[in-house]
Amino acid sequence: MALKGVVLYDFLHAKGGAERLTLDLVRGLEGTELCFGYRQPDVFPSEALADMVSHDLKAATPIPGWRTLKVLRAFAGQQSAFLQDYDWAVFSGVLAPVAVRHRRGRRNLYYCHTPPRFVYDLRAYYQQQFALPLRPALAVLAAYVKHQYEASVSQMDVVIANSENVRGRLRKFLGVEATVVHPPIDVERFRWRHRGDYFVSLARLEDFKRVDLIVEAFLRMPSKELVVVSGGAQFETLRTKAAQAPNIRFTSWLGDEALAEVMGGARASIYIPRDEDFGMSPVESMAAGKPVIGVAEGGLLETIVHGETGWLLPADPSVDQIVDAVASLTGDAAEAMRTACERRAREFSKQRFLGRMGELVTG
């Protein structure tokens, strides 16, 4: 009889890399079900999960701090006691792992996208994002999440990191040694379609993704076209900033096929976040035969080969450096990297990911 497994994730509210990995794992390992804190219907309609057995703990709330506590309580509470019935569980996220308390004597694996950064390395940064009267509350929340998180990770049979970068964070902040299994890339879906002249920005529109620098660079290059294929907190701000620039277009989030079409026709992609955990988007770009203008820090050091599959800018790039990189990546230069990009992306294929995860869940 096949073993029965479950993958747990905090909440489905954005189409990011962690969400794609979670769903790939459920679909790719036979007899696997999904459990999550809540689902954002406009981002993940019910039909998007129609091909799997899923359990929605319905812990949604619009209040950010209370949302974290509500999701934690949902995974920790008796409504999650049914999780004891599964032979193995993979915990994906930073809140879902508290449900390990329901699974004593069972096989438990934690797939770490990153330790919660508002608790550890970016604590001061997140404090600055809150109004002064709210900062003590954030500090209390961070301390509570830290306690719950560390207690939960300590109970896992196996800890998996999505990159050497995240493996280092786990070692530094928790004293935990992890096995690295890079995230899965759908190299069949992302393919070279044609030779276009536009550049694509794939990062979520948040401050630490530094898409504002990319937009600023293209405001200085009216002859170069940029397509921003994402959404996020800075969507309206950046769109307003570029309102008078016909060479910059915002699409918001795209469906799978539309995204693959845009990526497959670009000249290259640009992805310059601060200390990215891993970064699936650059590998998807390479799977489409398109080089990446990235930064020499974080997970991008594990994927982009400088001069072969793209360019790595300094860790804190200036707008001028982005402009120079775009100017140097001509159509011929980009197409010359196509074969190397496709070959590099295959090293991160979904098949490799599922094969390695299959080995780990069965022990």
Image (cartoon, rainbow, N blue to C red):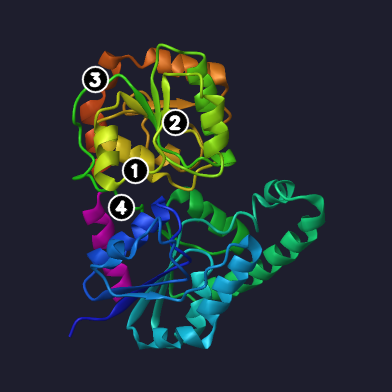
Mark 4, Cα crowd under 10 Å, few <14 / some 14-19 / many 20+, is: many
Q: Give the residue type that dot 1 points to.
A: Leu
Near-viewer residue (150 or 260):
260
Which residue is the extreme one toward the right?
133
User: Where residue 136 appears, x then y in whole percent?
Assistant: 79, 60
Structural distance between the alpha carbons of marks 2 and 1: 22 Å
Q: Which residues are magenta?
A: 349-363
Q: Disc 1 designates what residue?
A: 254
| Mark 2: few/some/many CA within 10 Å (<14, 14-19, 20+) | many
Mark 4 = which residue?
184
The image quadrant that residue 353 belongs to is bottom left
Position of 44 with respect to 11 (left or right) is left
Q: Which residue is pictured at 57% across the width and 78% down the height?
A: 73
From the top left corner, tell me how far across and down residue 355 is, in percent.
23, 61
Q: Residue at x 50, y 72 (%)?
A: 97
**Which amino acid lies under the numbered mark 2 shown in the image of this protein?**
Gly
Q: Nearer the viewer, mark 1 or mark 4?
A: 1
